[in-house]
Amino acid sequence: MLSNGAYLRSVKVIRERIESQAEYPFCLPAFKDLDSIDFHPKVTMIVGENGTGKSTFLEAIAVAWGFNPEGGTINFNFASRPSHSELYQYIRLVKGIKKPRNGFFFRAESFYNLATTIEELDREGAGARVIDSYGGRSLHEQSHGEAFFATFMNRFGGQGLYILDEPEAALSPLRQMAMISRIHELVRQDSQFVITTHSPIIMAYPDAKIVQLTETGLAEIEYEQTEHYIIMREFINNREKMLKILMNA
């Protein structure tokens, strides 16, 4: 297992570079007083409501590490529509002594662009087929969820750093449970994950640190304290009452 030979130990905000707290994303509560975040050597979950800055923060970490802003391995350099923030210029990554042998930045919202780039590279025919590292079958010829899962199962390997932005986006609850199994398998092979998610299933992975971004700032919390768990539990346990409240609102 990774000791605190984690590949990514922490991220520090270089506050002296910030010219204005009124600019995005420093205007968001989670970033106003943020100096640093330490990462779990195995799995760190970044959770919170829409608009709290989760994906922006994850993207900055990935870009600062050297990943393409739209996803993929470090070797990908495609760009369909540059839209990433400049936050990566205001942070410093604290890396471990060991370097990962593998890595991937997974973005649900730009996965289509990644799949298209893979097909274009293979049409050019320079070197081995890229798609063979993803299971050998075109990602566009599979359902969204199948393509996601093919990537997790085939392209991810041991001794890797995996930065995942909402990997559950196209996965059924059953596939999300299978995702937990895959994460655990890779953690046992000395991999490290940083994940943003809305899924109470994925964030239930036991050997993880959960960091929640809220309107009042940023805090490390337990699984049972997450809004996602609380709301889902209340809805399932009191479905009729909750539906009545929602539909009569």
Image (spheres, rainbow, N blue to C red):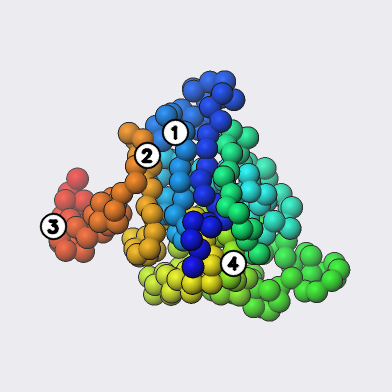
Q: Nearer the viewer, mark 2 or mark 4?
A: 4
Q: Nearer the viewer, mark 3 or mark 4?
A: 4
Cα gap from disc 3 to disc 4, whole angstroms? 47 Å
Residue 127 in view here: yes
What secondary structure is marked by label 2? strand
- What's the amino acid at mark 1? Leu
Frontmost residue, 36 versus 152:
36
Q: Give the vertical position of 242 relative to 30 (above or below).
A: below
Which residue is identified by label 4? 159
* Residue visible at 63% across and 41% down in the picture: 83
Q: Determine the residue positioned at 44% across, 54% down.
A: 40
Query: Pointer 1 and pointer 3: residues touching (CB < 8 Å)?
Result: no
Residue 218, numbered label: 2
Given residues 214 and 108, the one toward you in this image is 214
Q: Earlier in the sequence, mark 2 or mark 4?
A: 4
Whether tag 2 and tag 4 are in contact, CB under 8 A, the answer is: no
Residue 125 percent coordinates (x, y): 85, 71
